[in-house]
Amino acid sequence: MITTLCKIVSQRSVLALAAAFLLLFGTPSSSFAADAGAKPFLESIYKSYTDANADGIEWRGPNAQLYFDANLTKLILKDLKESKGELSRIEFDPFIYAQDFDLQDLSITVTPKGTARAVGNVSFKNIGAVTKITYDLVKTLKGWRIENMSWDGAEAGADNLRALLSRPLGATAEAD
């Protein structure tokens, strides 16, 4: 009788422990689901460049927080304030690494780096030129945001958004 009672208590303890674990950490697929949101985030950005009436996105000013993490948003707003509407540190759209666009062959892949980080790789042809952009993504309380982005083929020291925005004003960068 005591042996049977110990088995029942032991089974209930294991079940309670398993339930607590699932509540705290979620199911194995829930961490994947959290990472899966990074790709739709990037897809939503590029939809503004590929739809029939595409005109890109307004990424400067108050909209910066929709796409970039808090630190990168601060750098973007600082650049906007310091440039006073004149030449800023970046003279191109960072999402296409150009000023004009006609995107073809868009490809977006995302590799999860845990539950709150991911690396996105975007490639496309823009007016015939192949462009590749790498995104460092982070999941914030507001959803997925860009922590940094870099462009293949850009000059050293000007190959990522954070580095460009950290330069002194007047050290502008243009896409190749």
Image (tube, grey):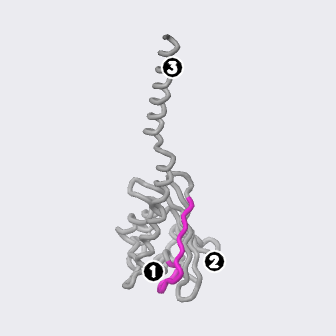
Question: What's the residue at 51%, 82% (across, down)?
Answer: 98
- Above or below: residue 99 compared with residue 74: below
Three-letter amino acid code at disc 2?
Answer: Gly
* Mark before the other along the chain sequence, 2 or 1: 1
Q: Is residue 104 placed above or below 114 in the rendered structure?
A: below
Q: Position of residue 21 (x, y in %)?
A: 48, 36
Magenta residues? 96-111
Tag 2 near tag 1, CB within 8 Å: no
**Mark 3 or mark 2: whose residue is earlier in sequence:** 3
Q: Nearer the viewer, residue 24 or 64?
A: 24
Residue 75 in magenta stretch? no
Q: Residue 7: horizontal and vertical position, in percent?
A: 51, 20
Label 3 element class: helix
Say which element carries label 1.
loop
Within the image, what quadrant is residue 43 found in?
A: bottom left
Taking depth in this image into account, of 114 and 78 the one nearest to the observer is: 114
List the residue tagged with mark 1: 87
Residue that appears at 49% across and 75% down? 94
